[in-house]
Amino acid sequence: MKQYFKNTFDGIFTVLIGMKVTFKHLFTPAVTIQYPDVKVKLPERVRNRLYVNMDDCIGCDQCSRACPVSCIEIETVKSIPGEDLGITSNGKKKALWVTKFDIDIAKCCYCQLCVFPCPTECIYMTDVYEFAEYERSNFLYKFATLTDEEAVQKKINYEKFQTEKAAAAAKSKPETPAQTENKSE
Amino acid sequence: MYQFLYDLIGNEIIAGLLVAIVPLTIILVFALFGIWLERKVSAHMQDRLGPMRTGWHGWLQTVADLMKMLQKEDIIATDADKTLYNIAPVLVFTGSFAAYAVIPFSSKLLGSEVEIGIFYVLAISSLVVAGILMAGWSANNKYSLLGAMRAAAQIISYEIPTALIVLSMVMLTGTLSLDKISQMQTSSFWNWNIFGGAIFGLSKFLLIPFMFVGALILFISTLAEVNRIPFDIPEAESELVAGYFTEYCGMKWGMFMLAEYGNMFAVSAIIVILFFGGYQSPIGYFGNSVGVQWLVPFEQGFWFIAKGLTLVFVQMWLRWTLPRLRVDQLMTVCWKYLIPYAFLNLIIIGIISLL
């Protein structure tokens, strides 16, 4: 009988304790972060979407070779003498037209291995992490600044220059065309 | 209300329909508000925010959900008993809606002024059990059937302590009419039944502890009757998917939801009428002190809904505090604890009221 009343008392008392706890939590500030409106501050060295600053790119292809999943594709065309491509921000002279610089971000594994070999520090990780797309093809980011027509034009220019040089070389036999090519580089 | 409308319009059917629309509107608005409140209360008790994006603090979330439910395809399982399956949600909602017929929201908004109000409420709310059994049986799903069986066992068990406490209150007040019980507790909160009723004397002070016990038992047993946590074994999400309405979808499911919230307010209203003074103000009426008589019924309506919502809030509060009871624990609470205490309470209140 004593146990019976103790059970009754415990039943009511413990429920009241529980209610006290939940009532306290009713007025504690929520821990929710209203995501699209409020964003958590990212850590300093966070790795997210890649970006290439094409003004500084010299087309050396080192990032593409460093990539473990081969998501970077680069095509370059040599410039012909007389064309001024400008210099990069750390003083290097650009010698190649970058006709294609594609990063398939869907393949990217965010390892940052492409960032370290870059001699001009033009490829780097940004803090953008919201880049969902409806079409898978939209994940192929094209960074090349030349338009398709311009790229074709550069190619034609270079080929023209090559044939002209080959013709010049044919006239003066002693020099081999391969050596001149190395010199111009 | 009916008499007023009848005098105004002069047509029995139209006046009756208009009177019937009032509680329907109250249920619908309350369901919209109650579901939003439940979400916010549960969220804040768990240190979350709840719905925030539809309207101010998500107050339109329920409306958006309603729109979604109305657009859903109505799927009926091939092996279901289609007639019973379609009737069940209507019956369950009818049970909770019909209880509103006798609930006095204020001295002018009474609904039906029947003399046997509380008896009618107890009787008509049993209709819900039939609806739930029908839903569980006709869906031809084992989880539904288990849920329905549990619901039937639970609701019928818990009707006994409810009836015993109601009986003791009827004994004390000497009437079954909800309006008359409300009128008895007028003028001040000190006259509410939970403080021993309006008759001042020795018996009033003797009654107070037993009234508190009675109110507590009535609250617990009605909580079990509307199948809410901690007494939600008929629905038991982690065990039975959704209990008796597992197979329902779209607006039929919505009607079960509507019935649940309608019931929540209905049982709160019964507790308020029996113990907390019904529509009476605890501190006197502003309309009376200023001399504007027509303001009084509106104030009464405000007080009734405020008291009801407070109890609804306590129900939600309990829901997010306690875990679900096991079936045997549920039956233990009812048969071993609530019923003996309710009986004892009934006898003691009987003796005191004889004094």
Image (spheres, rainbow, N blue to C red):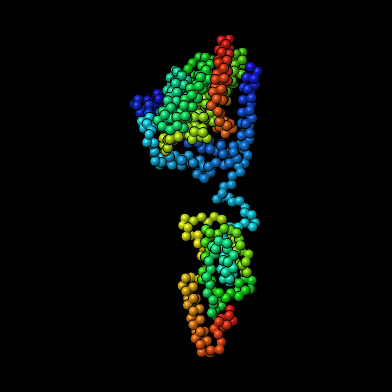
Can residue B295 be seen here? The reply is no
Front one among B330 and B103: B330
Give the total number of marks visible in the rendering. 0
Q: Which residue is the extreme one toward the top?
A: B355
Residue B209, image x, y percentages: 61, 18
Location of residue A171 in the rendering, given as x and y in whole percent from the top left corner: 51, 89
Q: Is residue B221 above or below residue B36?
A: above
Side of B171 relative to B97 (left or right): right
Tell me where residue B252 sits by quadrant. top left
| Quarter placement of the N terminus of chain A | top right
Judge whether residue B147 can be spotted in this image. yes
Residue B348, x across and y down, in percent: 58, 13
Front residue of B192 and B281: B192
Q: In front here: B23 or A183?
A: A183
Quadrant where the C terminus of chain A lies?
Answer: bottom right
Q: Residue at x 62, y 41 (%)?
A: A29
Q: Residue at x 56, y 36 (%)?
A: B41
> Residue at position x 61%, y 31% from top?
A19
Asked which quadrant contains residue B251, the reply is top left
* Spot occupied by residue B139 in the image (x, y as percentages of width and height): 41, 32
Residue at horizontal 52 percent and vertical 65 percent from the top: A102
